[in-house]
Image: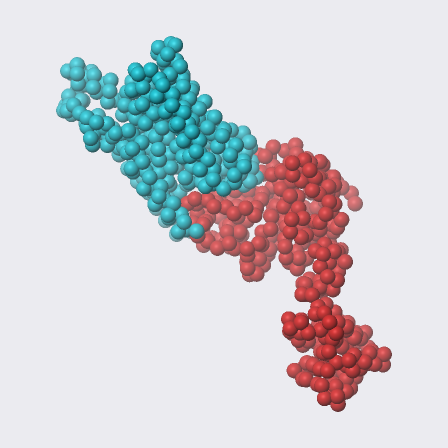
Chain colours: A cyan, B red
Amino acid sequence: MEYSYKQNIGKYARYNAVFILLIVAYIALTIWNINSGSVDISIRDICKIIFTGEGEPISYNIIWKIRLPRILTAGLLGGALALAGFLLQTFFNNPIAGPFVLGISSGAKLFVAVVMIVILKYAGTISSLSMVGAAFLGSLISMGFVLLAARKVRQMPMLLVTGIMISYICSAITEFLITFAKDSDIVNLHNWSQGSFSGMDWDSVWVCTVIVGIATLTVFLLSKPIGAYQMGESYAQSMGLNIKTFRVVLILLSSLLAGCVTAFAGPISFVGIAVPHLIKLSLNTSKPIIVIPAAFLGGGVFCLFCDYIARTVFSPVELSISTVTAMFGAPIVIVMLIRRQGQR
Amino acid sequence: MDKNCYYFHTKDLSVGYKGKPLIRDISIGLHKGEILTLIGPNGSGKSTILKSITKHLQAIAGDSFVEEISVKSLSYKELSKKMAVVLTERLRPEMMSCRDIVSTGRYPYTGTMGILSEEDKKIVDEALQKVHGEDLSDRDFLSISDGQKQRILLARAICQKPEIIILDEPTSFLDIKHKLELLTILRQMAKDENITVIMSLHEIDLAQKISDKIMCVKGEMIENFGTPKEIFTKEIITSLYEIEEGAYNISFGSVELPKPVGEAKTFVISSCGSGIEVFRHLQKEKIPFYCGIIYENDLDYSVAVSLATEVVTATPFEEITDEQYARAIKLIDLCDHVIKTDFPIGKSNKRIEDLVKYAEMKDILECR
């Protein structure tokens, strides 16, 4: 009994340590990000601009109109991506499922591109919400194809290959559309289709906050059934979970989260796989009630860090965010796969 | 029998896949605390029946009832407080300790966020104790052996505080020690806590020993359902598994490999169990043999009947008759080898001595 008690203390100490670390990293990266960029602004000025709203107009605009919205969305969308990955991994009961590899991000990308080109042509302006709507629809349709394939192919590797193929098809069509789009649209679209947090405004921040906030809260409140689902569908059902409804909920939530990210920042690779894995590993548990908030924070930290690199390393040239996330995320995924093979 | 006194019963239950019935009109009844075991060849539909009872598969027709409440009418949530399962599918949870796995059994009882109360934790502890799994509590589920996993999954089911536990082949992959351990726990639960157990087993000898009721699953209809005494007869078991007549040994509940074919040239004189080893050896070497004179209550008897080309038998507690003796001599005359094992010879089986002498005289005797 005493042994178990000690173990418990160790467990909770570990959870606390991980959460504290994540929160500190989140805040530190936010501050660090505000403080860095191609234009140098002193910390004193930054504090003055943020807290009093006074300062040089140029610095003021850089902080308020460029850096802050970008940082806030990077944090939020990173979290959303990690959660989407976690949900898909739970759904497919496979650790390498994620919005990017399953072609869901690319489906969203295609739909957003179509909507952007069509609406920009006829209406001239486009609202964030309609972009999210298009991305959500695209995610759902891609997911639909993956699920159709999942009914035929039982083995996960085949399913992933299907996802990657869907992803290629969607990307090809998107590239095709971009090539024939009007010049002025192309610059915009090209940046976005490679994945980037640049060009965020406060409108995006609010839409992101509302959508990601609601979705994240819902996912967190579903911790209990997600935990049951991790035991496999048959066991989950025998515990009283209505599998059919829950499956739909999982699909909708993961598509909404992945779609929202794609609508604003384009397709971003590897965050959805690497972050949940790292989080589970550091917490040494896969209990959703702990992993969900940690993965959300972790995704934010990961994306803030990667965005920092994307912005600053070759400044003023900016890397696409996927380049950086792949650089850090892909090795993690490879190590994870090798470790797993070793366990068998 | 009065249906109302049953705790669990099925009524004209037809099960199968995609609307096609595999097994039709299953109507059986169980009392509370009874153990029902489904036996039958591979692919006969044991799992299908179990899955239909647990509502993992939709019943094609008919229904199951728990205390007269139709299982169909229950929601999954309501059902989960009555029925728990241990499934065959391999569970591969990530980074979950055995205690975590067992705790999931409390799912139907915890609140919205699934946080365990002190009471829940106590129940988890008790369940772990029942399966002797306290030491496994903090181990990673993936790192323990199959036998341990099965016990942990049983603890998980116990945690769910069910009235019925359904287990699909719980003893597959287990060695004999763990098989016995698991079945002992089940028996205990059924007896002490009045939990009804429905399961499928491949080991018919164990099924016979642990069950109160047996259901034979083969073909479109359930033809045999009853107590082990009613079911474990030569006729039912040999036809159920389509094994050769005589291969199934009722008194031991075990099976023998097919008897050697051909003309027998060997005669075995044995008794008191000393012949079993010889019979099995001859079977392995594919040497057909005669055997005698064995009393019908002798340990050697049932194995000899399964393996020997012909057995000369004697009525228990009687002296060997002339007729039996003459038959044995006749068979020895056909042989060029007689094996005699070591066993006591007393008043009633005195004539065995004469048989041995006869063989010795013919110079074909081998004593073991």
* Residue farthest to the top, as pictured: A123
The quarter in which the N terminus of chain B is drawn is: top right
Residue B318, quarter of picture: bottom right
Front-most of A41 and A147? A147
Residue shown at 77% from the left, 72% from the top:
B310
Residue shown at 29% from the left, 20% from the top:
A187
Give the x, y percent position of residue B353: 76, 85
Give the x, y percent position of residue B95: 41, 45
Q: Classify residue B76 as left or right of residue A184.
A: right
Give the x, y percent position of residue A208: 36, 22
Residue B67 in view in this figure: no
Task: Say if B189 sits above or below B59 in the image.
Answer: below
Q: How many marks?
A: 0
Residue shown at 63% from the left, 55% from the top:
B202
Give the x, y percent position of residue B179: 57, 57
Front-most of A174 and A311? A174
Task: Say if B205 sits above or below A6 in the image.
Answer: below
The quarter in which the C terminus of chain B is drawn is: bottom right
Residue shown at 47% from the left, 26% from the top:
A140
Q: Classify residue B312 as left or right of residue A13.
A: right
Residue A172, quarter of picture: top left
Front-most of B58 and A285? B58
Task: Say if B63 sits above or below A65 in the image.
Answer: below
